[in-house]
Image (spheres, grey):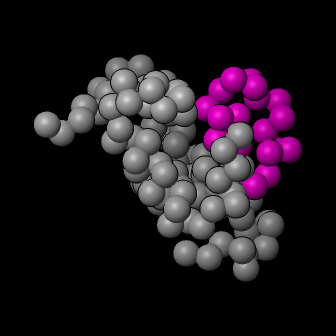
């Protein structure tokens, strides 16, 4: 998927739709999570009022907007699949904390 040809206004409308879906359903399809990660990294100035230690700030530090969408997708999938102990060994977990009542993912034995 190549998002670059879309103008900024269209990208903003897509991000607004992602946010509204997240608010109304409390979950979004994985492809929209990829777009969300790209968008918050590509336009950090739109999120200046958020905490510097939150999930969005962590994604921005990774500068995923410089990655291809395929690579962002792989990163997010691997980040969800790796056990927490391994992530701590590798330098920390960039995942946001689970939502209240959400079951954490367990590694497949």
Using the image, determine if residue 8 lies above or below residue 79.
below
Q: Residue at x 82, y 30 (%)?
A: 49
Give percent across and percent down for residue 22. Answer: 52, 43
Using the image, determine if residue 99 lies above or below residue 81.
above
Give percent across and percent down for residue 24. Answer: 50, 41
Q: Residue at x 74, y 59 (%)?
A: 12
Which is nearer the eye, 61 or 86? 86
Look at the image and say whether residue 53 sits in the magenta stretch.
yes
Look at the image and say whether residue 48 sits in the magenta stretch.
yes
Q: Is residue 67 visible?
A: yes
Give percent across and percent down for residue 87. Answer: 44, 31
Q: Residue at x 59, y 58 (%)?
A: 35
Q: Picture quarter containing residue 38?
A: bottom right
The span shown in magenta is: 42-60
Classify the position of the C terminus by image quarter. Answer: top left
Q: Residue at x 61, y 32 (%)?
A: 55
List the single residue furthest toward the top.
100
Using the image, determine if residue 80 lies above or below residue 101.
below
List the single residue furthest toward the bottom.
5
Q: Picture quarter containing residue 68?
A: bottom right
């Amino acid at each position: 998927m190549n998002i670059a040809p879309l103008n900024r206004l269209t990208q903003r409308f897509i991000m607004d739709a992602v946010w509204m879906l997240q608010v109304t359903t409390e979950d979004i399809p994985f492809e929209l999570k990829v777009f969300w990660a790209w968008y918050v990294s590509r336009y950090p100035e739109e999120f200046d009022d958020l905490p510097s230690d939150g999930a969005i700030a962590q994604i921005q530090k990774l500068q995923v907007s410089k990655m291809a969408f395929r690579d962002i997708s792989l990163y997010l999938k691997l980040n969800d699949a790796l056990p927490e102990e391994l992530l701590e060994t590798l330098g920390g977990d960039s995942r946001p904390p689970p939502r209240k009542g959400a079951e954490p993912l367990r590694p497949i034995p």
